[in-house]
């Protein structure tokens, strides 16, 4: 049996501004790249957008009550850059700052620690028109924006995450075009990766200058396995691991890019890395599933695809890229088609500790969750698959603690069913069901009650 979680283990839930807030024209908010992307025919699976989403802009207090009833310690939410600077530059928008000022106050009054993410992918459209994250100016403007927000909220926000999942923003948004801004640049997208990391560093410096309490990250990590022992498949898997995991962890933790990658990055890279590697107080890990990689067209890749013929991989790699992602065999898959593999979370955490040693700060699992096929009966929502998933992944965290990893908290993705990016409202990740097409009624699911009881059990002296 794994070590029980400590009584002071931090529990929370996570959300993102564009996925839940709605109110896209309220309070002087400007347009974001996701507003523009959703206008593209065929970009979103169900043709929807985040224009209304869960209407949390108007129902924030209702959501805080749900958090309070759940018994969590913290809430990780994101701040919409277009609410603070509608054009991504210039003076702060007072109405936007006022909204988040009230939001943070309501969390504090409920005894819930605010964990604020400054960028969860909703770049002001005006900055995209100037090159977006492919341009160095965007990173510089991000530092300015961070200073505006910290000036207002630094005294109450318990933890700051400058950039959420820069690897996903790079790969999905700039390399293969699945997410906003919808660019398919292939390896040229690494310039966006560097500027996202630089933005993280510049925001960290701006936050420190305002005397913030603590700063962390929210990086997406996946254990990467080769489809076979053949040299070509191992080489492909090593390359993918470098791009997905090491290229975003090592600049932050070690102040260097892996395997000479820095040679191809724009700007004064050595100087930038001193900014990017500014010391942090916590390292955030977002984990969903492992990745199986082979060389395109190799015998190992063909055999791996044949082994799971009915399962689809969400990331379609463009031709000419020297790795291929294939379905991962699993006993169970989420509604999204992702393999349920809690042991992968333990593997990621142990791997981070082994790779980075004392340079790895205390860890928070900043996202952990799944989309499920929920059953609605007589006003109740049954989601046994989510309960099973969360239970197994908490055990995986305990296994990592057993292995010596300093894990201090776990955030469920997500509090609410919400706008799931390119999938629109076809995937439901929430502990709470939301009638996004009707009256926005919130209905806590069975998993909400389960987690509430699990937290109570951990907190209760035995």
Image: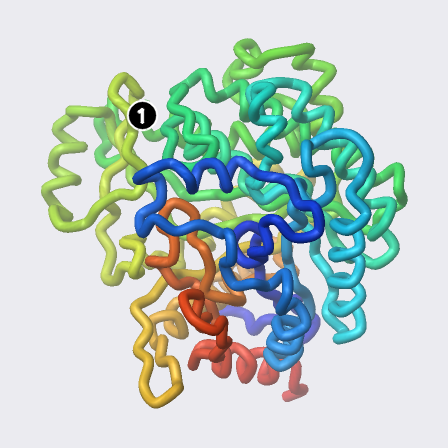
Question: Relative to residue 179, is residue 112 drawn left or right?
Answer: right
- Dot 1, how many residues are within 10 Å of its Cα: few (below 14), some (14-19), or many (20+)? many
Q: In the image shown, does 352 or 284 lie closer to the viewer?
A: 284
Q: In the image shown, does 206 or 388 lie closer to the viewer?
A: 206
- When asked about the image quadrant of residue 224, the answer is top left
Look at 59% across and 39% down and name the residue there: 31
Type of colouring = rainbow
Quadrant location of the N terminus in the rendered image: bottom left
In this picture, is 399 found above or below 126? Answer: below
Across and down, in percent, residue 460 comes to 65, 86
Asked if one can make out residue 113 in the rendered structure from this viewpoint, the answer is yes
Q: How many marks?
A: 1
Q: In the image shown, does 167 or 425 lie closer to the viewer?
A: 425
Look at 81% across and 47% down and name the residue there: 94
In this picture, is 197 found above or below 62? Answer: above
Across and down, in percent, residue 3 comes to 55, 70
In this picture, is 412 found above or below 37? Answer: below
Q: In the image shown, does 414 or 123 lie closer to the viewer?
A: 123
Asked if one can make out residue 216 in the rendered structure from this viewpoint, the answer is no
Question: Relative to residue 46, is residue 3 drawn left or right?
Answer: right
**Mark 1 lies on residue:** 236
Question: Relative to residue 113, is residue 72 drawn left or right?
Answer: left
Q: Secondary structure at mark 1?
A: helix
In this picture, is 413 found above or below 461? Answer: above
Quadrant location of the C terminus in the rendered image: bottom right
Across and down, in percent, residue 209 comes to 88, 37
- When asked about the image quadrant of residue 267, the answer is top right
Look at 35% across and 80% down and name the residue there: 382
Across and down, in percent, residue 185 comes to 41, 19
Question: Relative to residue 316, is residue 97 drawn left or right?
Answer: right
């Amino acid at each position: 049996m794994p070590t029980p979680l400590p009584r002071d283990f931090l529990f929370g839930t996570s959300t993102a501004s564009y996925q839940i807030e709605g109110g896209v024209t309220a309070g002087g908010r400007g347009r974001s790249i996701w507003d523009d992307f959703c206008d593209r025919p065929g970009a979103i699976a169900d043709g929807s957008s985040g224009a209304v989403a869960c209407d949390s802009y108007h129902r924030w207090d209702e959501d805080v009550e749900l958090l309070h009833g759940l018994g969590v310690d913290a809430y990780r939410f994101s701040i919409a850059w277009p609410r603070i600077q509608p054009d991504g530059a210039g003076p702060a928008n007072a109405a936007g700052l006022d909204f988040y000022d009230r939001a943070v106050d309501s969390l504090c009054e409920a005894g819930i620690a605010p964990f604020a993410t400054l960028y969860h992918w909703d770049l002001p459209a005006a900055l995209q028109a100037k090159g977006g994250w492919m341009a160095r100016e965007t990173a510089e403007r991000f530092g300015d924006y961070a200073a505006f927000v910290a000036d207002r909220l630094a005294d109450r926000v318990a933890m700051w995450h400058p950039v959420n999942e820069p690897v996903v923003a790079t790969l999905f948004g700039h390399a293969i075009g699945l997410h906003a801004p919808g660019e398919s640049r292939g390896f040229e997208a690494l310039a966006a990766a560097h500027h996202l990391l630089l933005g993280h560093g510049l925001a960290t410096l701006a936050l420190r200058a305002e005397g913030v309490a603590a700063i962390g990250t929210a990086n997406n990590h996946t254990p990467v396995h080769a489809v076979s022992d053949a040299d070509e498949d191992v080489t492909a898997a090593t390359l993918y691991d470098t791009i997905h995991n090491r290229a975003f962890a090592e600049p932050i933790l070690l102040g260097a890019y892996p395997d000479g990658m820095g040679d191809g990055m724009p700007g004064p890279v050595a100087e930038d890395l001193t900014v990017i590697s500014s010391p942090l107080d916590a390292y955030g890990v977002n984990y969903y599933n492992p990745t199986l990689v082979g060389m395109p067209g190799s015998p190992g890749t063909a055999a791996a695809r044949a082994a799971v013929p009915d399962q689809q991989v969400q990331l379609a790699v463009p031709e000419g890229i020297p790795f291929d992602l294939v379905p991962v065999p699993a006993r169970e898959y989420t509604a999204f088609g992702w393999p349920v593999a809690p042991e992968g979370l333990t593997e990621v955490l142990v791997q981070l500790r082994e790779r980075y040693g004392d340079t790895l700060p205390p860890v928070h699992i900043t996202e952990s969750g799944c989309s499920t096929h929920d059953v609605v009966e007589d006003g109740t929502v049954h989601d046994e698959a989510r309960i099973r998933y969360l239970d197994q992944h908490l055990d995986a965290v305990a296994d990592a603690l057993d292995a010596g990893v300093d894990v201090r908290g776990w955030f469920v993705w997500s509090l609410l069913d919400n706008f799931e990016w390119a999938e629109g409202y076809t995937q439901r990740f929430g502990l709470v069901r939301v009638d996004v097409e009707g009256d926005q009624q919130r209905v806590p699911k069975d998993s909400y009650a389960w987690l509430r009881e699990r937290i109570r059990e951990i907190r209760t002296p035995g």
